[in-house]
Image: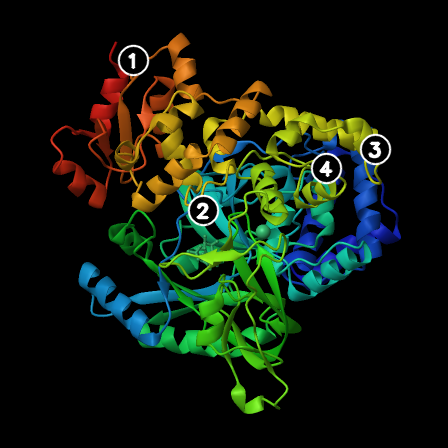
Amino acid sequence: MALQIDDGELLTTTRGWIDADRPVNSLEDALALQQLLRQHEHKYYVLNQPIISDWEYDMLYKKLEKAEALNPQFVRANSPTQRVGSSLNQGFETVSHIVPMLSLDNSYSAADLTDWDRKVRDMSKLAEVEYCIEPKFDGASLSLLYDTDLLVRSATRGDGVQGDDITANSKQIRNIPLSANFSQFGLQQVEIRGEVMMTKAAFADYNSSLAREGTGPLANPRNAAAGSLRLKDPREVGRRKLEAFLYHVSWFSKLENPALATRPTPTTHAQMLQMMWDLGFKSPMHEMKVVQGIQGVIDYCNAYEAIRDELPYEIDGMVVKVNNLDLQERLGMTTHHPRWAMAYKFKARQATTKLIGVDFQVGRTGAVTPVAKLEPVYLGGVTVSSISMHNADYISEKDLRLGDTVLVERAGDVIPQIVKSLPQFRQGHEQIIVYPKCCPACQSTLFKEADEAVWRCINIECPAQVVEKMIHFVSKDALDIKSFGEQQVRKFYQDDLLKDIPGIYTLDFERIGTLDGFGSKSIDNLKQAIAASKQQPLHRLIYGLGIRHVGESMAKALAQQVNHLLDIEQFNTEQLLEIPDVGPKVAASIVQFFKNPQNIEMLRQLEDLGLNMVQQKQAATAMGEARFSGLSFLFTGTLSRLKRSEAEAQVEKLGGSILGGVSSKLHYLVVGADAGSKLEKAKKIPAITILSEDDFVSLMQQE
Ligand code: AMP
Ligand code: ZN
């Protein structure tokens, strides 16, 4: 049964149910009512043209809900009542995408597009290429998996290879069909990509509701959509008024019995969009355009840029795709992006406003950053009221003065910037910005290194730094102590409940219980989260220490090199430099950190408090199977039989380690399709054995 049927016919059937209060007596009745509700959902959520009132819809929905409750055998997985799921009490499960969700290559001008077109024509040996252009929706991406016409899974993009399973939440997005008749196109399993969006209006509503609750506003609709997808309570997701544009079929398998298909399988991207549209998805059918040759692409991009502010949702550019799917396949992809698609980014948006103040903020490394306070200004979906001015040079180069009118700009994802001051608007009372000589938090004298632009407070006991360090320590990418965020750290610090990192593990919960907003439930959660953090893998602890220049991937590389955290104390600069990606700056900073007796003392305390300081992989393999023990691996290019993450997990399970880059420490480089610079580099180092994917698989299977 089709979703898109004639309004008159749909209305007559609907009236039949409502006016005569038709009862649900049989399975046939229930299935008919389910289909009727699906058709109304489609009218409302995909076409934005409801033909009955919300009240009438609710009545029909309740009728179905009641009938299904009395007769559970009427329930079908795609019944509109099945969108409601229960809350998660744990985190989301990690799932692998069938095809990695890659980034898109970016272009910023007509010339960039023309260059790309030339490459596509060269590779395809065509005089002119057919392109399909559609908006680049600025939301949160997701993938949907349908099997035998049913929605079976949905996931966030995650790192592109693996994402979070958000099936229950996706079902709450009403324009995502719970079922779609892919079989008629001869398709069995279908993986679809799309973008979850909050319209500008829904975003504004949502922000005002946050304001009523006393919570700060979110920066933009994209963050709101992304945050909503990761809520633990699907019902709350339902309240956020999200919608999804589905713009891409990334993978499909064919039905075993092709005779069941009644329509041809699409052969172009535009036909895919049409197929999705016909099956009830909100695909950009009305937003897209198919053109011959690049000039048409450029014209369409320009035309769309001119109307972007009139759209009900945010877009940050256009996406141009080679229309023919065979040609897409032939063009293939690099490790970062498909060669058959190109994003065209719209120009930055600018606005003028007044610079009304400067805050000097002390970061966790003691760097003092000037932050401009602005008269709030709306800049392409975001209200901007403060912008970092980075350092003293930035202020003097741009000659920014207090009271100045300034031009601010925001380009796509990039955080807003001050482009320049507009001296023609000065009235004489503007003031030069004076950089403080002393730390605004502890008053000690600021220092600046010769080759650096930032002034720093070097007092290790500086309260601002201590607090920022603790905030970093508990943060999501470090020890990830849930329900212990910036606010809690500041509050406990102010109330003398917390003075340093080890203090996190000796908190006085009795006193905390007397504070406002800390009930026994929230204290239990806090205790649990703190206890759980003790078992975090070593690299998170290393990252959490906030050693300068040691980011997440550097922390992982360091963790790989040791059995115990304090082993690093023994490393000298030369040894550190041997670690992949470690340069002189990083090495110096690590040496300095471990030279400081206060830091060592803190680490000893943390160990006594029960924090994990050993590299667990090596500890684990000492007990289990350790055939790869002491051997290091690195994967490059696209693997065809295994997912990279799985292959890496297997290596680690067998006691091997994964390195971050090619160096003389590497034993095996496993090479998939389209391998690039890593392979070239490895060929020059005789000690490295280069394996194909098949070699790797047989190596694993050896006894
Ligand atoms: P980027 O992350 O900037 O490289 O851009 C890639 C992302 O753009 C994809 O992962 C999608 O989430 C998003 N996107 C938005 N609209 C589209 C579209 N029409 N086609 C493909 N990707 C899109
Ligand atoms: Zn200070």
Residue situated in front as seen by the camera: 320 or 366 = 366
The residue at which mark 4 appears reads as 28
Residue situated in front as seen by the camera: 368 or 203 = 368
The quadrant holding residue 452 is: bottom left
Q: Earlier in the sequence, mark 4 or mark 3?
A: 4
Judged from the image, the secondary structure of the residue bearing numbered disc 1 is loop
How many numbered marks does the figure carry?
Answer: 4
The residue at which mark 1 appears reads as 627
Distance from the alpha carbon under mark 1 to that under mark 2: 48 Å
Distance from the alpha carbon under mark 3 to that under mark 2: 56 Å
Where residue 492 appears, x then y in whole percent? Answer: 73, 39
Q: Earlier in the sequence, mark 3 or mark 2?
A: 2
- Specify whether 71 is left or right of 202: right
**Residue type highlighted by circle 2:** Phe
Q: Nearer the viewer, mark 4 or mark 3?
A: 3
Beta carbon at label 4 within 8 Å of ligand 1: no
Residue at (80% x, 30% y) in the render: 521
Distance from the alpha carbon under mark 1 to that under mark 3: 50 Å
Q: Earlier in the sequence, mark 4 or mark 1?
A: 4
Q: Nearer the viewer, mark 1 or mark 3?
A: 3
Judged from the image, the secondary structure of the residue bearing numbered disc 2 is helix
Beta carbon at label 1 within 8 Å of ligand 1: no
**Residue type highlighted by circle 4:** Glu
The residue at which mark 3 appears reads as 519
Residue at (39% x, 23% y) in the render: 567
Judged from the image, the secondary structure of the residue bearing numbered disc 3 is loop
Q: Can you say whether 145 is above or below 57 in the image?
A: above
The residue at which mark 2 appears reads as 185
Counting other residues with Cα less than 10 Å from the Cα at mark 2, is it few (<14), some (14-19), or many (20 or more)? Answer: some
Q: Nearer the viewer, mark 4 or mark 2?
A: 2
Q: Earlier in the sequence, mark 4 or mark 2?
A: 4
Distance from the alpha carbon under mark 4 to that under mark 3: 52 Å
